Image (cartoon, rainbow, N blue to C red):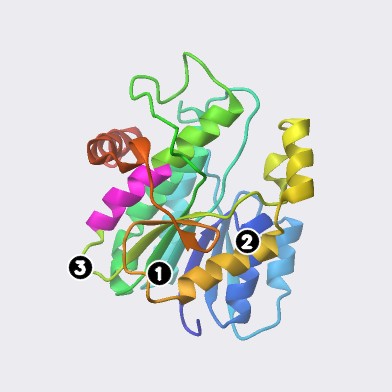
Amino acid sequence: MTGKVAVITGGTSGIGLATASALARQGARVIVLSRRPGSEGARKLSALKGPGEVDVIACDLGRLASVRAAARQVADRCDVVHLLMNNAGIFLRERAESADGLEMTFQVNYLSHFLLSNLLLDRLGAARGARVVNMVAPVDSIRLDFDDLMSKRSYSFLSASARSKLALVLAARRLSETLSGTGAQVLCYYPGLVRSGLFEGTSFVLKKLIDVVGATPTQAAANLLEILADTSHTDTPAFFERTKVRPLRGMATDAEAATRLWEMSTRLVGLT
């Protein structure tokens, strides 16, 4: 990883922090986009000793203007981006809207990462072999309601999160097509249940289950780095559950849905 540039959202806690730390120790230049650049996790990254380096840029995924500002800072600092890890995510028990008037879970988990990926397309293309990793979850039984992407008619934190993850999987298809010819690979990575702060404030039963059976962030990050180090994977996009490729089913395989979502997302984030 010496000399490589990695951009990670949500890199000051959980899997993001573990991955950022490991990449920096391997010699990468890691740029972490975080809503809390002064957090304990950010201080841990700043204190790392190793051949790599870590920069932390303030980025609130709940504000599209903040995503644009962060993308400009990344572009100003780096001519290429070798790895983009769309990692940050939230669970909200109650429906909320962002300052942009968008449902918060869908924006933070999906739309802001969609915008960031598109704003960094030229830097990813310049790497000639970049990797984009979308952090996802099993989505075989999930469907998007294109007439209610903002969950105004009904909302639950589990279904809202699941729909945002399906959106990331569908967008990976179109992003892969957009980066065709650059050698880039787009990967969807489901780490399994992981013991992190992501589930704080959600279901007590869910949190206790994860505390018992979940992997540590370090284990999940190690699995991801194993995937990234394996150059034999050529399919793009590919869906990994832990370290194994598995086929997608249901709406996740729907090319027409992927195109429709891409076009709607472009309008929602103001890329047109």
Residue 236 location in percent, x, y?
A: 32, 60
Query: What is the total number of numbered labels drawn onto the structure image?
Result: 3
Q: Dot 1: within a 10 Å radius of its alpha carbon, few (fewer than 14), some, or many (20 or more) residues?
A: many
Q: CA distance from mark 2 to mark 1?
A: 22 Å
Residue 159 location in percent, x, y?
A: 53, 28
In the displayed structure, 266 sits above or below 40; it is above
* Circle number at residue 158: none
Q: Is residue 177 magenta?
A: yes
Residue at image x 63%, y 61%? 220
Residue 145 location in percent, x, y?
A: 37, 23
Residue at image x 39%, y 29%? 144
Q: Earlier in the sequence, mark 2 or mark 1?
A: 1
Q: Can you tell which of label 3 and label 1 is closer to the viewer?
A: 3
Please name the predominant secondary structure of the magenta segment in the image.
Answer: helix
In the displayed structure, 4 sits above or below 245; it is below
Name which residue type carries label 2: Ala
- Local SS, label 3: loop
* Circle number at residue 220: 2
Whether residue 50 can be seen here: yes
Residue at image x 47%, y 13%? 153
**C-beta proximity under 8 Å, tags 2 and 1:** no
Name which residue type carries label 1: Val
* Circle number at residue 81: 1
Q: CA distance from mark 2 to mark 3?
A: 30 Å
Q: Find the magenta span and give its range.
A: 168-178
Horizontally, residue 176 falls left or right of residue 65, namely left
Q: CA distance from mark 3 to mark 1?
A: 16 Å
* Circle number at residue 181: 3
